[in-house]
């Protein structure tokens, strides 16, 4: 008789998840995926109407979800608000922005807007959630939404690349600091995903054609392409995975 190993599985029943930038696009997909896997999801963003509608849709579909108004750029308020929620087992650090410009045209305001949201806010949101995880002594999974541009360079993307490369390094170092507490830190690095944020860029036919030439699978990404990766990194199936990046880029970075 062979004693077969059993998969740890991908269910998240009984776990609490926080998703930032959850009102639309990748954040909404992350929240929906986690809820479908059984997690109780808190959707955080600045726009009340968006996150309330999103949480309502997840609840109507049979999931567990609630809305939390949160401006992650306000570090002190964010820290206090997260602490007041109790501990989470899962964080999807998703809030982000982009201002594509030629390097010589980038202003200090552009720099602050992109780096403050994509890096500084991500750092302190993760720190706040990790504090709760450590205090509750239950371990957890921190998932940073990076980009393929955290692995390669891109035209007119100096700020975005700087923020996403930094996020990769931050996540690796964070994984080392948090490993003794059974808290994992990883990134997901998507290619161009059709979302409200990317739509204005992809409406440019020449830009869209160039992107499609670089994605070896021959199509743009959809938010659904990221949902499995998010659930995997959050789940018991990934309890030995930390300090790495799950690249979901259709082969862009393969050559």
Image: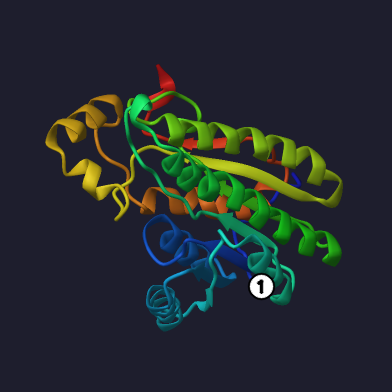
* Color style of the picture: rainbow
In the rendered structure, the answer to whether residue 133 lies left or right of residue 159 reads: right
Instruction: Place residue 13 in its image quadrant.
Output: bottom right
Tell me: residue 31, above or below residue 250: below
Q: Position of residue 178 (x, y in %)?
A: 80, 46
Q: Position of residue 157 (x, y in %)?
A: 38, 31
Q: Residue furthest top?
A: 255
Residue on which the image places disc 1: 81
For the residue pair 75 and 199, the one nearer the viewer reads as 75
Q: Residue furthest left?
A: 205
Q: Residue furthest front?
A: 108
Q: Position of residue 78 (x, y in %)?
A: 64, 66
Disc 1 element: helix
Q: Position of residue 81 (x, y in %)?
A: 66, 73
- Is the C terminus in the top left, top right, bottom left or bottom right quadrant? top left
Q: Residue at x 65, y 69 (%)?
A: 77
Q: Residue at x 68, y 64 (%)?
A: 76
Tell me: residue 229, above or below residue 68: above
For the residue pair 169 and 236, the one nearer the viewer reads as 169
For the residue pair 58 and 44, the one nearer the viewer reads as 44
Tell me: residue 93, above or below residue 115: below
For the residue pair 32 and 162, the one nearer the viewer reads as 162
Q: Please count the marks in the image.
A: 1
Instruction: Place residue 140 in its image quadrant.
Output: bottom right
Q: Is residue 7 visible?
A: no
Q: Label 1: few (<14), some or many (≥20) within 10 Å?
A: some
Q: Is residue 249 visible?
A: yes
């Amino acid at each position: 008789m062979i004693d077969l190993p059993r998969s740890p599985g991908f269910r998240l029943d009984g776990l609490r998840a926080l998703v930032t930038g959850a009102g639309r696009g990748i954040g909404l997909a992350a929240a929906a995926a986690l809820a479908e896997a059984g997690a109780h999801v808190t959707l955080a963003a600045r726009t009340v109407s968006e996150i309330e509608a999103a949480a309502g849709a997840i609840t109507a579909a049979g999931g567990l979800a609630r809305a939390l108004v949160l401006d992650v750029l306000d570090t002190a308020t964010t820290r206090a608000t997260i602490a007041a929620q109790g501990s989470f087992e899962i964080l999807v650090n998703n809030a982000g922005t982009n201002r594509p410009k030629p390097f010589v045209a980038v202003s200090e305001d552009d720099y602050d807007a992109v780096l403050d949201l994509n890096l500084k806010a991500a750092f302190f949101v993760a720190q706040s959630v990790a504090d709760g995880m450590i205090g509750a002594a239950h371990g957890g999974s921190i998932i940073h939404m990076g980009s393929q541009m955290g692995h390669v360079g891109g035209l007119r993307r100096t700020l975005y690349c700087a923020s996403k490369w930094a996020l990769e390094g931050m996540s690796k170092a964070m994984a080392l600091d948090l490993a003794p507490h059974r808290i994992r830190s990883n990134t997901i690095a998507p290619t161009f995903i059709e979302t409200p944020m990317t739509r204005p860029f992809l409406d440019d036919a020449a830009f869209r054609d160039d992107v499609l030439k670089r994605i070896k699978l021959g199509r743009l990404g959809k938010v659904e392409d990221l949902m499995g990766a998010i659930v995997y990194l959050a789940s018991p199936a990934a309890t030995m995975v930390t300090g790495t990046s799950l690249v979901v880029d259709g082969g862009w970075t393969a050559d």
